[in-house]
């Protein structure tokens, strides 16, 4: 169990290093993603001169704070072209990010992820993905979502995941 936690932290640290390097190449871009769900959760600006470690015990404490406040999102770090968020949801409406890659690290729960296909709206305005591929996932799984790929989390039990996002460099 400890090795699994260390592996997830290692993945986050490696992801952060990549994000910081990418941010240096792209420059200060416009922030992506939703606003902070609860104003009293601190948010760190992404440093460019040092690495940052988010300890598993601290993250678990944040998950509990979010549960108590019924908060669905908390931005851990903001870098303009890259960020790291904690998300707690029962579902995630279909979306597509033309220039942004998502990496989801599943921390709690299990569910069904759908990707590919096309995003459509029904008569009531609710969106879904038609022709996508459904995949089951659980704690410890990592989902890589390339830029431009429709994706979402189908309705089900509550899921907690780390969402690492970064903008693609245009050549």
Image: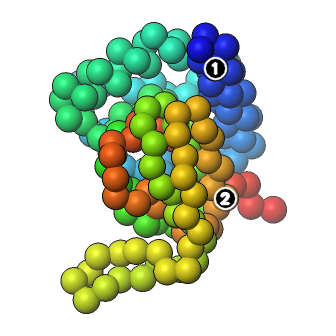
Residue at x 52%, y 34% (from the top left corner): 139
User: Which residue lies at the image location 60% right of the left edge and 38% below the top edge?
Assistant: 141
* Secondary element at tag 2: loop
Model colouring: rainbow
- Left or right of 168? Residue 129 is left
- Where 47 sits versus 34, above or below? above
Provide residue 85's location: percent of width, then percent of height.
45, 36
Give coordinates of residue 111: x percent, y percent: 45, 49
Q: Which of marks 2 and 1 is nearer the N terminus?
A: 1
Few, some or many residues within 10 Å of mark 2 (<14, 14–19, 20+)? some
Residue at left 40%, top 18%?
A: 60
Relative to 42, residue 19 above or below? below
Between 22 and 129, the one nearer to me in the picture? 129
Q: Quadrant of the C terminus?
A: bottom right
When the figure is inspected, residue 9 is found, relative to residue 69, above or below; the finding is above
- The image quadrant of residue 79 is top right
Q: Position of residue 96 (x, y in %)?
A: 52, 67
Q: Can you give x and y, in whole percent of width and height, for residue 150 in the image?
A: 54, 69
Label 1: how many Cα within 10 Å (few below 14, some 14–19, many 20+): few
Q: Whole-Å distance between the Cαs marked 2 and 1?
A: 25 Å
Q: What element carries label 1?
A: helix
Q: Horizontally, is 122 left or right of 150 in the view?
A: left
**Farthest left residue in view:** 69
The quadrant the N terminus occupies is: top right
Location of mark 2 (residue): 146
Which residue is located at x 44 percent, y 19 percent? Answer: 59
- Which dot, 2 or 1, sits closer to the camera? 1
| Residue designated by label 1 | 4
Q: Is residue 48 visible?
A: no
């Amino acid at each position: 169990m400890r090795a699994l936690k260390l592996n997830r932290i290692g993945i986050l640290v490696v992801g952060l290093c990549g994000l910081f390097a990418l941010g240096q190449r792209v420059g200060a871009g416009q922030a992506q993603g939703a606003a902070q769900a609860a104003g009293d959760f601190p948010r760190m600006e992404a440093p460019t001169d040092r690495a940052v470690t988010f300890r598993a015990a601290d993250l678990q404490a944040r998950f509990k704070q979010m549960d108590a406040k019924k908060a669905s999102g908390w931005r851990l770090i903001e870098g303009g072209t890259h960020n790291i968020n904690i998300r707690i949801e029962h579902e995630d409406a279909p979306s597509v990010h033309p220039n942004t890659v998502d990496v989801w690290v599943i921390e709690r729960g299990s569910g069904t992820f759908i990707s590919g296909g096309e995003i459509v709206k029904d008569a009531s305005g609710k969106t879904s993905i038609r022709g996508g591929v459904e995949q089951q996932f659980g704690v410890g799984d990592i989902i890589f979502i390339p830029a431009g790929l429709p994706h979402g989390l189908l309705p089900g039990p509550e899921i907690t995941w780390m969402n690492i996002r970064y903008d693609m460099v245009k050549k």
